[in-house]
Image: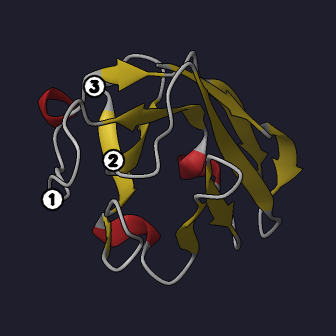
Amino acid sequence: VQLQASGGGLVQAGGSLRLSCAASGRTIKNYAVAWFRQAPGKEREFVAAISWNGGSTFYTNSVKGRFTVSRDNAKNTVSLQMISLKPEDTAVYYCASKRAQYEGIGVTRYDYTYWGQGTQVTVSS
C-alpha cells in the first residue's frame, strides 16, 4: 500500500489546517491508521490514531481538544483536522497504516508498517 499525506502549509497561530491521507494499492478500510509528526532535531512522535472501523480514536495529550482524526472508508482516506494551531505544532506530519487488518490502535512508530512521505505544517507566531 502507498500512502500520500497532503494538506500541509503555512498558517498563523490560532489557524486551522486539514490533513488528508490517501491510500493506493490497497484499501485501508480494515486497518488502523495513525498520524505522527517530526520536528527538526526531534524524534518522530505519535499524534493521533483511529481504529479500523472508526469506532475508537486516541490522541497525544498536547493535541486533545484541538485535533480530530476521522476516516472515510468509501474514499479510502483518513483525515486530521487541526484547529487552534500553535507554533509547537510545526513539524512534518506523516500518516501510517498497520500491516494487519482489524488490529487495535498503536501509539508507537513500531506499531505501523506503511508510511506516507509526510507533509510540512508550519505555524507562525
The amino acid on which the numbered mark 3 sits, given as a three-letter code, is Glu
Element at label 2: loop
Is the Cβ of the residue at disc 2 closer than 8 Å to that at disc 3?
Answer: no
Disc ID at residue 104: 1
| Residue 92: % across, % down | 57, 28
Q: Nearer the viewer, residue 108 or 31?
A: 31
Disc ID at residue 31: 2
Element at label 3: loop
Tell me how far mark 3 sits from mark 1, CA to CA: 23 Å
Residue found at x 70% / y 45%:
20
Label 2 neighbour load within 10 Å: few <14, some 14-19, many 20+: many
For residue 45, above or below residue 48:
above
Residue found at x 19% / y 36%:
100
Q: Nearer the viewer, residue 75 or 112?
A: 75
Disc ID at residue 123: none
Q: Earlier in the sequence, mark 2 or mark 3?
A: 2
| Residue 55: % across, % down | 35, 80
Tell me how far mark 2 sits from mark 3, CA to CA: 24 Å
| Residue 123: % across, % down | 74, 46
Q: Quadrant of residue 50?
A: bottom left
Residue found at x 16% / y 50%:
106
Tell me how far mark 1 sits from mark 2, CA to CA: 9 Å
Label 1 neighbour load within 10 Å: few <14, some 14-19, many 20+: some
The amino acid on which the numbered mark 2 sits, given as a three-letter code, is Tyr
Drawn side of residue 60 relative to residue 81, left or right: left
Q: Earlier in the sequence, mark 1 or mark 2?
A: 2
Is the Cβ of the residue at disc 3 closer than 8 Å to that at disc 1?
Answer: no
Q: Earlier in the sequence, mark 3 or mark 1?
A: 3
Is the Cβ of the residue at disc 1 closer than 8 Å to that at disc 2?
Answer: no
Foreground tag (2 vs 3): 2
Element at label 1: loop
Disc ID at residue 43: 3
